[in-house]
Image (cartoon, helix red, strand yellow):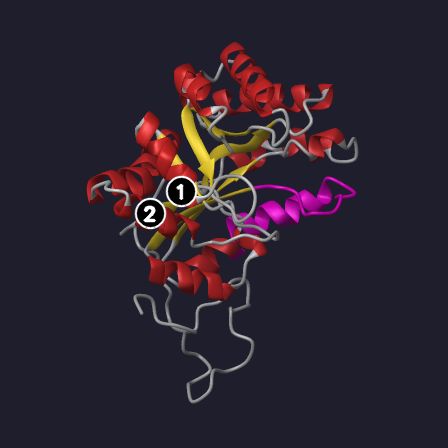
Amino acid sequence: MRIFDPHIHMSSRTTDDYQAMYAAGVRAVVEPSFWLGQPRTSPQSFFDYFDALLGWEPFRAAQYGISHHCTIALNPKEANDPRCTPVLEELPRYLVKDQVVAVGEIGYDSMTPAEDTAMGVQLELAAEYGLPALVHTPHRDKLEGLRRTVDVVRESALGIERALLDHLNEGTVKEAKDSGAWLGFSVYPDTKMDEERMVAVLKEYGPEKVLVNSAADWGKSDPLKTRKVGEAMLAAGFDEDTVDLVLWRNPVAFYSLSGRLRLDAPEAPAGATHEGNSILRGAPKGADAAAPAVPVGV
């Protein structure tokens, strides 16, 4: 089973997670920019974070044979903080980077006027830079938020067919599907979707343009949820080709809209570092200090 997790926040995860993900079949990830869990106090804090998404995280992923891309944006929650909104003016210098395959996460958290403004600006940037958009639908008032999101995207220069509407559930999937957008589902312990609910949605609405992600982050989450969905699909009678469509070919198709997706297995040469730092904290037991932590393919 080959897996592309199209929405996972690896900056919040340990290197052990990369190893476990590779063993589970994950070969590619997209990491959307999101909030820290506590308020940022200036635009400058975004820039180091964006740089890490473009440098350190692809380096860590490469140690385990995983291709890493990212999406860049001012996320909806922080769009409400006037200390953060100046970052919108600096986004263009990041949106030209090869590893950036979409503008995101954009969209709604509380559906405020500030979120309207940030979403509008970033949809126009997506259109200008030829990128698709990863759109966060709100966790509260989901159907109202979905409808408002679809209206805003349709009114933009981007086009709804270049938008991935994420965090969908049973209450929003029909209208999202009818809109012509790509459909994203986050499978997450205790909240959002679970494996059984995801299988039920796939049975009712089909696998076309459906992307399943773990959305794993600093909360209680599981970076192997994509694998568990694949196993649940097989147990429910879906064939391997349909599992491959949902867990691999659909995310490849969506992020290929950027023209930047590269899925070649990254190389991790012995002794590799990123700006002088490796993923090792000292030499492994019984091994040369220059050897990689875990050879790719193991």
Residue 123 occupies quadrant: top right
Q: Are marks 1 and 2 in contact (CB under 8 Å)?
A: yes
Q: Which residues are magenta?
A: 33-56
* Whole-percent x, y for residue 8 in the image: 49, 47
Please tell me in which quadrant of the rendered image residue 255 appears. top left
- Report the residue marked by disc 2: 232
Query: Label 1 vs label 2: CA separation?
Result: 7 Å
Q: Is residue 159 visible?
A: yes
Q: Nearer the viewer, residue 260 or 37?
A: 37
**Residue 171 belongs to the span the image colors magenta:** no
Give me the residue at 56% from left, 28% from top: 137
Q: Residues within 10 Å of mark 2 (few under 14, many from 20)?
A: some
Measured as percent of width and height from the top left, residue 266 is found at 35, 56
Above-or-below relation of 220 to 191: below
Residue drawn at the location 79% of the way across and 35% of the way down: 83
Quarter of the image where one finds residue 80? top right
Circle 1 sits in a helix, a strand or a loop, which is it?
A: helix
90 w.r.t. 280: above or below: above
* Residue sitting farthest toward the bottom: 286
Mark 2 or mark 1, which is nearer the start of the sequence? 1
Q: Amino acid at mark 2?
A: Ala
Q: Along the horizontal axis of the image, is 236 left or right of 285?
A: left
Residue 162: where, in percent of width, then height? Answer: 42, 23
Give the amino acid type for the residue marked by disc 1 in the picture.
Glu
Task: Decide which of 221, 267 is in the foreground and name it.
Answer: 221
Q: Residues within 10 Å of mark 1 (few under 14, many from 20)?
A: some
* Residue at (42, 47) in percent of width and height: 29
As drawn, is 73 to the left or to the right of 171? right
Q: Quadrant of the C terminus?
A: bottom left
The numbered mark at residue 196 is: 1
The x and y percentages for residue 144 are 60, 18
Which residue is drawn at the image coordinates 65% and 44% (left, top)?
47
